[in-house]
Amino acid sequence: MSRTSFNELLEAGAHFGHLKRKWNPAMAPYIYAEKNGIHIIDLNKTVAKIDEAANALKQIARSGKKVLFVATKKQAKDIVAERIKPLNMPYVTERWPGGMLTNFATIRKSIRRMAQIDKMTTDGTFSSISKKERLQISRERAKLEIQFGSIADLSRLPAALFIVDITKEHIAVKEAKRLNIPTFAIVDTNSNPNEVDYAIPANDDASTSIAYIIDLMGAAIKEGLAERKMDKEAQAAEEKDSKEESKHEAEELAAGLKFKNTEEEEGDKGGKRPRKRVTAKK
């Protein structure tokens, strides 16, 4: 069963593309028609691409890996932050820091600096420095929070990127391609869908369209996380049963050995014959 329908996407305004003169010819397979100089996206193909992308994201989440969401445009940033934060997935909604992926070690240093400052506030270091230094460090922490706060838990490179508007986030797309990281994206008629692995042809400017598709991707990730939890519980139960079975077998073996030893001891006692008295011949 499809995760969405033609009518739901239509209500969200996902079918509106850009002006004809701004189109990218690579989007031709996903364009249904032109109306008043604006390209209309074929939502039947959007439905299929949403299912394909959602199923792939579900499997990534089920495997315990992270998906990095990227949306720095004004109409998308708040939507992504609000929907993705509860899923404990990393996201970038401010300016994309150059080298975010290709120079990940440097980004991790900035994240560790945040943790270091947080430690200073709790271990009493702040009370031993001047007011001016405290102010400087606090400003540094606030700046780092804006840039890297949403990726603080990203200890390694993400397993995939989900991007809103690949034309705007072209640097993120290039970095992901360079590192062979799978890319998912909402792709409008002015972009090249061949630049990403999973392209969802849809309006990437309308907040209703963006929110609707992000919700669908978020639901797929939730399913993956729920199945991962079930897998862990099933594995734990199986391991517990295996341990109990091994313990039971060990107890049975120990009981069997004890019973055997007891039988042997009783057999030795019961089979013992009295010695004959030997008398000397005269």
Image (spheres, rainbow, N blue to C red):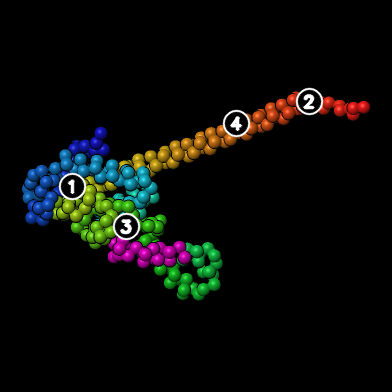
Q: Which mark is residue 273?
A: 2
Closer to the observer: label 4 or label 2?
A: 2
Crowd tier of the residue under label 4, counting other residues whose Cα lies within 10 Å: few below 14, some 14–19, many 20 or above: few
Q: Neighbour class for label 3 at 10 Å: few (<14), some, many (≥20)?
A: many
Going by the image, does 28 lie left or right of 123? Answer: left
Element assignment for label 3: strand
Tag 1 secondary structure? strand
Of the two numbered discs 2 and 1 in the rendering, the one whose residue sits closer to the viewer = 2
Residue for point 49% across, 39% down? 239
Dot 2 lies on which element? Answer: loop
Which residue in the protein does label 3 denote? 92
User: From mark 4 to mark 1, how far is it between C-alphas?
Assistant: 64 Å
- Note whether residue 172 is visible: no
What's the residue at 13%, 50% (across, down)?
A: 27
Magenta-colored span: 91-116
Expressed as whole percent of the image width and height from the top left, the position of residue 243 reads 53, 37
Type of the residue with mark 3: Val
Residue 38 in the image: x percent, y percent?
A: 10, 49
Give the amino acid type for the residue marked by disc 1 in the picture: Pro
Total labels: the figure holds: 4
In front: mark 4 or mark 3? 4
Q: Mark 4: which secondary structure?
A: helix
Q: Is residue 282 left or right of residue 213?
A: right
Q: Characterize the local packing of mark 1: few (<14), some (14-19) or many (20 or more) Cα atoms within 10 angstroms.
A: many
Q: Are marks 4 and 2 in contact (CB under 8 Å)?
A: no
Please give the residue where the numbered disc 4 appears in the rendered image: 252
Residue identified by numbered label 1: 201
Disc 4 from disc 2: Cα separation: 34 Å
